[in-house]
Image (tube, grey):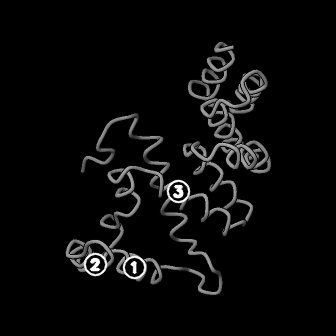
Amino acid sequence: VAAYLLMGDWYADLKEDYGQAIPWYAKYMAMRPDDPEGRRRLSAAYLKAKDYDRVLETLLTFVQEHRDAVEVMPIAAQACVKQEKLDMASSFYRAYISRLNLEDRALYEDVSLIASKEEVADYARTSGAEREVFLRRFWSGRDPDLSTPVNERLLEHYRRVWYARQTFSKGRQPWDRR
């Protein structure tokens, strides 16, 4: 059974051939349908292959039945964004971030790399509820479409942080060593 995962990983990680990785991950999932790691790998391969319908087909019911499977939530969120289901994407990201430990959550809330020097100084002076107000105001000012209930720029920020952590950190902490 583990051989299916290994073959999927070989195609996905070494060959970057997600079309070839998907059948191997799918075979694994047929044998272990409740395995969150296998589900994450399969849905990530669908995401890379830009098969957003399959990402959601693979994850929506699974996430409802396995509320602790937080590692798949950002993948589902990205597929939702691509399908313009922004409310759903926002819900997935919020659920994901709320379940992270404080240190990891801080990475998603950190605006120092995209804020002005003045905003960074203001951010540093805040804490608790005051910081939440600051972040709401900060992101409201960057919302590209005020007519929608979701801040598309914030969703993109979450995607970029998640992508950087998945792609560049390789388990190293802190993930950004500037």
Are the residues tagged 3 and 2 within 8 Å (C-beta)?
no
Amino acid type, callout 3: Arg
* On-image quarter of the N terminus: top right
Amino acid type, callout 1: Phe
Q: Say whether residue 173 is left or right of residue 40.
A: left
Q: Residues within 10 Å of mark 1 (few under 14, many from 20)?
A: some
- Which residue is under mark 1? 138
Observer-nearest residue: 29 or 7?
29
- Chain-order first, disc 3 or disc 2: 2
> Looking at the image, which residue is at 61% across and 20% down?
10
Amino acid type, callout 2: Glu
- Chain-order first, disc 2 or disc 1: 2
> Looking at the image, which residue is at 44% across and 54% down?
161
Query: Residue 162 in the image: x percent, y percent?
Result: 48, 50
Query: Residue 117 in the image: x percent, y percent?
Result: 24, 75
- Which residue is under mark 2? 119
Spatial CA span between label 3 and label 2: 22 Å
